[in-house]
Image: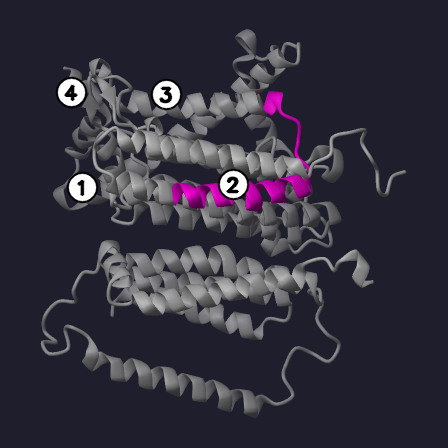
Amino acid sequence: MNFAFYLISGLAVAGALAAVLLKNTVHCALALTVAFAGIALLFLKLGAQFAGFAQILVYIGAVAILVVFAILLTRGSETPKDGVYSKFPLTGLAIAAAVFAVLGWAVLNSASALPGAANPSAAAPTVTVMDIGNALMSRYVLPLEIVALLLTAALIGAVIVAMHEKEEAK
Amino acid sequence: MIDKLDQVFVLLTHWVVGFLPAFLQPVAIVVIAVAAILVTFPGLFAICVLLERKGLGRMQNRLGPNRVGPFGLLQPVADGLKSLTKEDLVPLSADAAVHFLAPVFLVVVVFMGYAVLPVGRHMTLVNMDAGLLFYFAMGASTELSVFMAGWSSRNKYSLLGAMRAVAQMISYEVPLLMSSVAVVMITGSLSLNRIVEAQNQYTWGLPHWYIFTPWGFAGFVMFATAATAETNRSPFDLPEGESELVAGYFTEYSGFKFAEFFLGEYVGMLSISGLGATLFLGGWSAPLAVLGWVPSWIWFFGKVMLSMCVFIWLRGTLPRLRQDQLMNFAWKFVLPFTMLNLFVAAAWRFMGDGWERWVVCSVVLVIAYVVMARVGMRRKHFGPRSYRYAE
């Protein structure tokens, strides 16, 4: 917990807050990108190179672009007349708190399952990209294949949705 | 002597740093290396622009710039001074903050990619375990800058240009990554230094560059295609198609911000050329074992400049693609072919050292190429041009 940590976390939190509070939807999406970048930097600071770069590659390179595209192609970036704030702030707050609680519970419980849990004084193990690859191809190969199948199904579904209707069908 | 010449920049850095107190030395080494990158590549950018204008002039039967300095050699200086002194215009309805950030973000991200490129023996700024991943993470971030520029200008041409650019860059990023994955599979490492070292070996005086293997050649061709599209170069320069979109996503930029986009484009080309050279052309290693005495950085920069010349040559030769041709080519030809190439690379890896793997891999790739090209061309009808809307 040093200066760099506070700087990076400040960046991530500020980005996330701006994503919620800004009026213009495209600005919100760009602010969300800042939050993604902050999280990537946190991963890098923890020595998780693969997670950090994958975060940048996937979230900033693809997800953020898709979000702004979706905004542009659907509603436009104009602020709606009745404001951007929700009419049911308490419901939203409750849902956010519930999600946060589940995530926090999972994180706190997973601490005991880590390899270094028995010996907390030992330094964190350095995990290289090769280790991650080996783990994905041996121990976690079934989840990997299931995710791949799911993504393929989603891809085919998207293509079918986007496909032109046949001429006869008109 | 020869070793000294090879390491001249490293030795020079250490000599300069030697004058500083010990606690400043690690910082000073990094600062000097970063400054060298920030000076060298914009310098090459100036040379490339001159080369491009002169070369295109030759190809189009004209002289090119010849007024500033001897043979027009000082033209880049004049261009730079002009863009520095021009008025910086921001449209009234533009989103000023995003409009300002877009070119800055682009230049920063493009230069970040150089951090992992090995420009010579022991000449990598950061020798990262996941160097290739870092490079692609930075490359993917340029799309955001393009979008920011196009959206914040509040101009229909800018926005259309940005949409085209982003769609194109996302489509071609997949084959770009997939063709590099084959190299990673064979080398067994994401570190660019390791990839160069794996290619820096010689049999009968000939190098073990990946381009001289069947999968490497196919991968290099696909990589070069995707890299051309990724840098928005002709024949994939629809995002800035002058005849349709004025200048695409940077229509509303003037003065130095325009120069920043220009710089970002060329420095991005130099950087992706460097990556291509590192992955397939052996990086800084010499093309023949007997030429090993030539300093390694000369080979790296020679390869980069050679591929820049190919970029310029392509621009002078090929007409621009249409949007549907661009997308069909990416998703129906380049992507399946790079995927097949992954399997071929895996077969190459597990077939051992015999001659059989050369035959099997080459035959599979050639058959796939011919079949895919034939099937792709079958549905095309070549005849007089037909217009749907402009009749």
Specify the label residue B302 is tagged with.
3
Q: Are discs 1 and 4 located on one and the same chain?
A: yes
Chain letter, disc 4 residue: B
Q: Pinpoint residue A72: horizontal percent, then vertical percent.
A: 67, 61
Residue A114 image-quadrant placement:
bottom left
Q: Residues within 10 Å of mark 4 (few under 14, many from 20)?
A: few
- Is residue B196 in view? yes
- Which of marks 1 and 2 precedes in the sequence? 1
Quickly name the residue at label 2.
B334
**Mark 3 vs mark 2, CA separation in Å:** 28 Å
In the rendered image of this protein, does residue B85 appear above or below residue B309? Answer: below
- Which of marks 2 and 4 precedes in the sequence? 4
Chain letter, disc 1 residue: B
Q: Pinpoint residue B126: horizontal percent, then vertical percent.
A: 27, 43
Q: Pinpoint residue B28: horizontal percent, then vertical percent.
A: 23, 40
Front residue of A121/B357: it is B357
| Residue name at image x 34 percent, y 34 percent | B360
Quickly name the residue at label 1.
B25
Q: Give left or right: position of B219 versus B171.
A: left
